[in-house]
Image: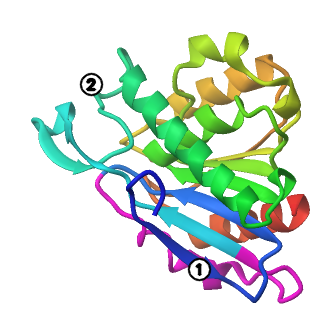
Amino acid sequence: MAQGLEVIEIETGPAPQAAVIWLHGLGADGHDFEPIVPELGLPAFLPVRFIFPNAPQRPVTINMGMRMRAWYDILQLGGGQEDEAGIRESQDFVEGLIARETQRGIPHGKIVLAGFSQGGAIVLQTALRQRKRLAGVMALSTYLPLAKTLEKERAAENSDLPIFMAHGKYDSMIPLDRAALSRDALLALGYAVEWREYPMQHSVCPEEIADIAAFLLRIL
């Protein structure tokens, strides 16, 4: 438990040397990406703790106010006004998970933040503002939230953070063009973005999983 929210953990071996904090998308839960862990095929010499937190239940405006697991409210499709309070609340939650891992013996430099869709937005929001260098961030089928505040708030310690961004060419939830604009905004600020496109919709595909595994091996 962290800040009252449930987290699901999978360790690929005893005495983990690294941690991946992986956030799910809107309406899903921490179990959503559990099946990916064995598919990554990480080597036995690199035991990793995967942490899959559950987002809190909250009303979501675009879904007629229905309560569901969400890292923040979505006020309208395609951008526009953002739920800044909700985004920053979830940033605080992820920072609590980072602190928890360091207390368990995993250094900041061996912690990766990963997220899909809404979860990807939160890990970008969090990682680029951290005052201690992380291992990297994986932003899947997502976009950069609160983009206008990043230049003022970003941390120099993570100015060269490895960023893996992946998106489906046929994504109708978050169009490829919107993700590309986020990529370009990060590049303009000097971030090193590894960009991948796949012939898929708002989902994950085997080729992407292989690229994720390669990225994790490289940064860890």
Classify residue 79 as left or right of residue 182: left
Q: Dot 1 corresponds to which residue? A: 10
Residue 75 makes an appearance in the image: yes
* Kind of residue indicated by mark 2: Gln
Give the image quarter of residue 5.
bottom left
Q: Is residue 55 above or below residue 184?
A: below
How packed mark 1 is, by other alpha carbons closer than 10 Å (few <14, some 14-19, many 20 or more), is some
Seen as rendered, the residue at the extreme front is 103
How packed mark 2 is, by other alpha carbons closer than 10 Å (few <14, some 14-19, many 20 or more), is few
Q: Is residue 55 above or below residue 84?
A: below
Q: Quadrant of the C terminus?
A: bottom right
Label 1 element class: strand
Q: Dot 2 corresponds to which residue? A: 76
Q: Residue at x 12, y 36 (%)?
A: 65
Earlier in the chain: of badge 2 and badge 1, it is 1
Residue 101: x %, y % from top left: 69, 60
Residue 41: x %, y % from top left: 73, 84
Q: Marks 2 and 1, Cα distance to the nearest angstrom? A: 35 Å
- Range shown magenta: 27-48
Residue 169 makes an appearance in the image: no
Label 2 element class: loop
Q: Nearer the viewer, residue 167 or 191?
A: 191
* Kind of residue indicated by mark 1: Ile
**Label of residue 220 in the image:** none
